[in-house]
Amino acid sequence: MNNSDFTFGYSTSTCPYDRNKDSKNTSKLTWEEKRGTVRDLANDIKNGYAFCPTFYHDGSAFGMSAKNQVNLKSSNFIVFDFDAVKLPAGEFYGKTIATDLTPSIIYTTANDGVFKDGKNETFCNRYRVIYVVDDPITMAETYTEIHQALKADIATYVGDNNIYNDNTDKDVAHFFAGCKNTELYCNNTVISLVGLCNRYNVVVSDTASAYSAKTNNLIEDKSAKPFPCVDIKEEEKYYTTRGNIIALFKDFYNDFLSRQKSIYDLVREYSGILPLLPEETPVEYDPDKLYKVVEENHIRIVRRRHKVTKRDARGNEYEAWETVKFKDGQRRHEILYKNLQMVKAITPTATREQLLWQGLNFVCRDLDNTKQPITKSQVSNTVEQVMSREWKPSEISKQKYKVTIAVDKELAAQKGIKRRYSGLAAAHEWKTDEKMKKWEKIATYYDPTKTDKDNVKIMNDAGISVTVQYLRKWKCKNGYSGKGKQSKSEQIALYYDPSLTDGQNLEQLAANGVGISLRTLQTWKAANGYTKSKKKTDNEFIVSAAFETQKSNCEISSHDAALNPDL
């Protein structure tokens, strides 16, 4: 079966519909049934028409009242509305292609790239994902069950629970607006309904029970027959496999050899069908940290960008970054070669066809090809040069980074950190963690019996970059004074022996690296209770005895006065 020739029934609005502009007239929308291919549905979306499944109705066209679950005739597609999700539409398409989750159509909505007022959103990627199935779904319950199971699979695969932000899409009677200014990706992928039912253990009802309730609620001709029910059995599956992608690349290469098709014709024709290779080595987030660290062997293609002022769907101005194209005389051939070289290092298994597709997209997207244009043969020769050897990351001229961390904005939003402060919070958390790691290393090598200079030398030899001033700051924060007074007191206590004389203790302390004077030792002994009390002289004893006698007489006089108030 040729999927490009597969046709199915669906409904479109009789006129273009823009939800942002025409929402007041939603209740007045009228619908008409039609039959077409995946490409036909994609064209209707790009022309701004709303679409929905087919319903039982009376007449050639029907209104919103007939568009409900009870009157469902069939749905040959499953639609997901993703609102404020992590991955942009193009990255989602590239991540899911050649898997069991390959969609038939992805298109961005009018609000894509715009943060909605009053919502604490982390991302602004808004698009719809459509899966076309080879047999019609005729029960609303079946549609919802498959929809929820498939959505859970997608959320797990892309690692983003934000796809649950909008749950109205599980209603089979829901309609979706098209978008004239959309970024659309489309291929002829058609998924087996039987395969989906088997995968998610969804049981399709038998004909009698499935349509007994429906036929009692028909608005149109009662003699109309619904689509036959699908039996649970093994049938041909139309999942897009890696083999299909290789076949598509072969078709692309055959077209590339054609003299009639230019670089721009090829990119326009295969855009949204052939996936691009990643342009950055993956960096794993620590789920508990606001930041991710860009490692030294990280490779990323960085483009020159400049700020431009644009207007959103509401007419509000906002600033965006656009790529600055390299012109003739700005080493375009060298830049093309280096970028393909880096792509090959990021994906060592890349084929010639994949690099060729990547190179053509780079020419269209990043190069000003008006003067002395780069030809297809030049791109092909560059690819051959890159493929002539296996590039290692250490041999690639990597981009240099001023910022070594990136922000996990999703985690920042969960912690209630505002977007404007998320970068500062992540930087502070990263610096704190780096400082604690360094402090742990210092604590491992620090020897309190040695001087600061000796400790610094030991740490520098061990690869820990520390100065004397930094070590003293560390000592202040970890129970030591900056100048080492407290540490000397602890060292004296460690080596002092009360059975030895002061001179002998000084020699013992000096032998253990604690150089102090006799006065310092005596001061320490007085502060720590090691100084012996002096014996009193005869004069001191007489004066003390006289003082005690006088004190005793005063206490007796006070006692007598208390007993006899007349005294």
Image: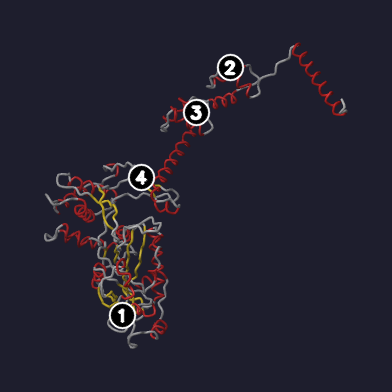
Task: State the SS at label 2.
Answer: helix
Q: Amino acid at mark 2?
A: Arg
Mark 1–mark 2 Cα distance, whole angstroms, equals 105 Å
- 131, 30: nearer the viewer: 30
Mark sitting earlier along the chain (3/2)? 3
Please determine whether, in this image, residue 567 is positioned above or below residue 242. above
Tell me where residue 158 appears, x and y as whole percent: 37, 59
Mark 4–mark 1 Cα distance, whole angstroms, equals 57 Å
Mark sitting earlier along the chain (4/1)? 1
Viewed as shown, does residue 173 lie left or right of 3?
Answer: right
Residue 500 occupies quadrant: top right
Residue contact at pointers 3 and 2, CB within 8 angstroms: no
| Residue sitting at x 19%, y 54% | 364
Mark 3–mark 2 Cα distance, whole angstroms, equals 22 Å
Please determine whether, in this image, residue 443 is positioned above or below residue 82. above
Tell me where residue 524 appears, x and y as whole percent: 60, 22
**Which residue lies under the disc numbered 4?**
294
Viewed as shown, does residue 406 lie left or right of 550?
Answer: left
Task: State the SS at label 1.
Answer: strand
Mark 2 Cα-neighbour bin, 10 Å: few <14, some 14–19, many ≥20: few
Mark 4–mark 2 Cα distance, whole angstroms, equals 56 Å
- 503, 395: nearer the viewer: 503
Mark sitting earlier along the chain (4/3)? 4
**Which residue lies under the disc numbered 3?**
482
Please determine whether, in this image, residue 46 is positioned above or below residue 67. above
Q: Can you see residue 249?
A: yes
Query: Where does the C terminus fall, quadrant-wise?
Result: top right
Q: Amino acid at mark 1?
A: Phe
Mark 4–mark 3 Cα distance, whole angstroms, equals 35 Å
**Which residue lies under the disc numbered 1?**
62
